[in-house]
Image (cartoon, rainbow, N blue to C red):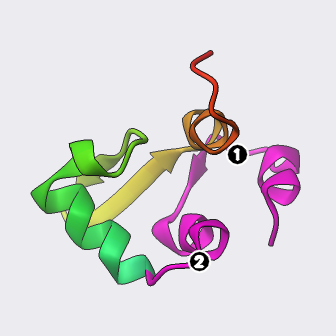
Amino acid sequence: MTLEDIEAMEGEIITPDIAAKILQCNPAYIRVAARQCPERLGFPVSVCGHRVRIPRRAFINFMRGTTA
């Protein structure tokens, strides 16, 4: 999966599994960080119970180094 694949998606939310493929890390790290210190991730996350959701456009902006 590439960043271009994420850009082509229609949904507005991605999972830690998808983000981890781009970041080349373990998705469990994203889940733990989202609960314990979300500010360290660099992109916004939403935690609802056991689920972690990531706004797709904000993640793309983070990866591209843009703020809009």
Q: Residue furthest left?
A: 36
Q: Which residue is mark 2?
A: 24
The percent coordinates of residue 28 (x first, y second) are 34, 81
Q: Is residue 37 left or right of residue 55?
A: left
Foreground of the two, 14 or 61: 61
Q: Residue at x 64, y 25 (%)?
A: 66
Q: Is residue 1 left or right of residue 58?
A: right
Disc 2 element:
loop
> Residue 61, position in %: x, y?
63, 33
Which amino acid does the dot numbered 1 rest on?
Gly
Give left or right: position of 19 versus 41.
right
- Residue 11 is marked as 1
**Marks 2 and 1 in Cβ contact (< 8 Å):** no
Residue bounds of the magenta highlight: 1-26
Relative to residue 7, is residue 49 drawn left or right? Answer: left
Q: In the rendered structure, find residue 47 and report the number of the disc placed on it.
A: none
Q: Residue at x 36, y 68 (%)?
A: 30
Circle 1 SS class = loop
What is the crowding at mark 1: few (fewer than 14 residues within 10 Å), some, or many (at least 20)?
A: few
Q: Amino acid at mark 2?
A: Gln
Q: Is residue 22 magenta?
A: yes
The quadrant where residue 7 appears: top right
